[in-house]
Amino acid sequence: MNNLVRLTKDKDVAIITIDNPPVNALSPGVPEGISAAIDEINGDSDAKAAVVIGAGRTFVAGADIKEFAKMTSGGPRRGLLPLLLRIEDSGKPVVMAIHGTAFGGGLELAMAGHYRVASPAAQVGQPEVKLGIIPGAGGTQRLPRLVGVAKAVEMCAEGKPVFAREAATFGLIDRLIEGDLLAGAVSFAREIAGKPALKTQERTEKLGTAAENAAIFAAARDKARKKQRGLKAPLAAIDAVEAGTGLSFEEGCQAEAKLFTECLFSDQSKALIHVFFGEREVAKIPDIPKETPVLPVNRVAVVGSGTMGGGIAMVFANAGIPVLLKDVDEAALDLGMGKIRKNYASSVQRGRFTQAFVDERLQLITPVLNYDAFSEVDMVVEAVFEGMALKKTVLADLDSACRRGAILATNTSTLNIDEIAGATSRPEAVIGTHFFSPANVMRLLEIVRGKKSSKEVIATCMQLSKKLGKIGVLVGNCRGFVGNRMFGPYRREAQFLIEEGAEVEAVDQALVEFGNAMGPMATGDLAGLDVGWRIRKEYRHLEKPGIRQPFAEDRLCEMGRFGQKTGKGWYRYDENRRANADPEVTALVRKWSADAGIPQRQISTAEIVDRCIYALVNEGARILQEGYALRAVDIDIIYLNGYGFPAYRGGPMWHADTVGVQKVYQRICEFHQQHGELWAPAPLLQRLAETGKTFAEFDKEQVAAA
Ligand code: 3H9
């Protein structure tokens, strides 16, 4: 048909093969090729039925997401509906044969067929909401006809994929095929050839009554508002399914098309598409080509069984990698293993893991008190208490205990990797792996490149992060690396605002309304205010004299108010760890501010958001310019996966692009005038503003120059 779609025959069954690697997306040429093949089959009197199948590892993973950006920047609108109607109208029945994934437009294509067969492990889904859009090729109209309204709403609004084995139980898949999918699909096609075939659009038996559906839609909207706070697409998806239940198929498709377009042209969708490609972009390191050899990581060890160490051991165990967990004495190890067991038990309780899975994982974790078996491991992650002297001692011990070729990773959030590496005779094997707490839950892994970290070690850790279910982002070795270095100015501004007269809850609420998972003060209370306090004390000698520093949090710490763990911090906590505003804190901060001569004023929500978020942007721009992050998108991915920044805003740097770099720069200049040196605009931000460029354009230039 063309180079993306082939038409062949197995006697009386025509076979349409879509071959558009890597994921058979419906890029230009694919719909046209399928359409031409259907026409040809309908003109072929020997063909009794057709099978549509994907070449390579998957059926069709969806519309080509790259095309969306072209559409929203003025390119031609590309619809799939006419093709799908042509398939449905085909005089010869069409069997869709699914393996790998049938996602988005891929599932919509499959639903236009008269039958669907699948390998049991295949996955089907309408994940469009994760891109800020809704199904745009009849998915919200055909899916309820096949699976019922409740299931269709769930799949379209939540976007979670379903295994074919499960989909077969609710009518989306007509037959599961173990073994050779094509052979099974062809024989299925022969069975149904010549029998009357149903068009999905004409099926109404699962569409339910208005009263039943009203309750389903109300519950789905409620859930979407809570679980997908701030996102517009899930609500639009529910609207589209609802339209389909009250209107004709054709009118339903029109309603869907309108909602799809509104979503596609929204800032949310642009941001989420940026995130989709960003998550894949961060794996690409300009000076470390894809072919760089990686080291096998089949057995690992973790040193330190505290909260971090225990969590990291679970991460490896969950990926099926055996792990030695070392601590200094029996009591510490028992405590660490106890916490791990408790964590797993709660996962079983919440239905995340089965007991059998947990038992297997626990078998993979071996507690040890010495380094004897360390000579057999391929990688060690040290996760002892954050302190340079201790880390150096542990690294020196590992240097003696581990075989040459093993990776020595240090889990630090602030310390200098090169100094730690200097404690070994093999700095090329040393790398930073900054897990985020709780390590077994948080997706982000900052991989910190030391001056001497070898390319093989970096490539191995990047690849390993995927196996561990993490998103690895390579960062440079500066204080706080990328995430925490930016978090400092963000929380500094939040404190300044409180010292200038804002209420603690007002600051948190403004940032939660912006979309962040938590406000900065509540986050501090959760992590423990003493952590930052200790670090600040250690680095106090580096502070420039005469520059304003926040003081309220340090004073709260001096009073023993460390946050949730002491029942008091910025908030007061009840026995269920619920935060309550604490008038004592307000009174104290007002007094301290008066003593310090800080004028008190009314502070707007907009100022709270600008001060905190632009502090992130300004520091992010410095980090970029200094080369500690490879691209602006790397910073975005860090913030989305480690700091609860809302994905629908694309990350702090993308957010700056969306607001307008010039506008952000001007606001930062105002803050500079009002609040002094800490707000000096980053030179890169200034350059971009003056040349009318965005951070995304800066990234493209970086990639082109690499
Ligand atoms: C849609 O269908 C809307 C419809 O309603 C129609 C409206 C008209 N397009 O993830 P991987 C690239 S919306 C373009 O690393 P994996 C990806 O960027 C779409 N490119 O592999 C990467 O490129 P590179 C609904 C795509 O095995 C390479 O393929 N569908 C697309 O870990 C490999 O990807 C979705 O949202 C695409 N659709 O995971 C599904 N998909 O190598 C999105 C992938 O240059 N895709 N690429 O970095 C996925 O979820 C995963 O890619 C998948 C494979 C599970 C399929």
Image: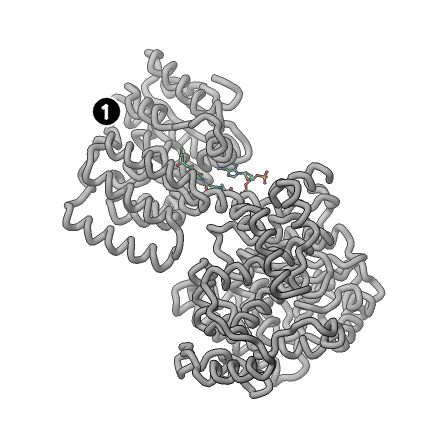
Residue 17 location in percent, x, y? 46, 25
Using the rendered view, name the quadrant where residue 505 is placed: bottom left
- Residue indicated by mark 1: 195
Residue 218 pos. (x, y %) = 24, 54
Work out which residue is located at the far bottom of the displayed protein and give it. 559
Q: Is residue 76 left or right of residue 693?
A: left
Q: Residue 550: which quarter of the image? A: bottom right
Say above or below: 322 vs 132: below
**559 and 222: which is toward the camera:** 559
- Could you tell me residue 444's position as x and y percent? 57, 58
- Helix, strand or loop at label 1? It is loop
Does residue 347 appear in the picture of this structure? yes
Q: In the rendered view, tell whether residue 185 sits above or below residue 548.
A: above
Q: Position of residue 421 (x, y in %)?
A: 79, 65
Q: Nearer the viewer, residue 663 or 332?
A: 663
Q: Name the side, left or right, on which 297 lies relative to 78.
A: right
58 in relation to 480, above or below = above
Number of labelled discs? 1
Graded by Cα atoms within 10 Å as few (under 14), some (14 to 19) or many (20 or more), the crowding at tag 1 reads: few
Q: Residue at x 65, y 74 (%)?
A: 549
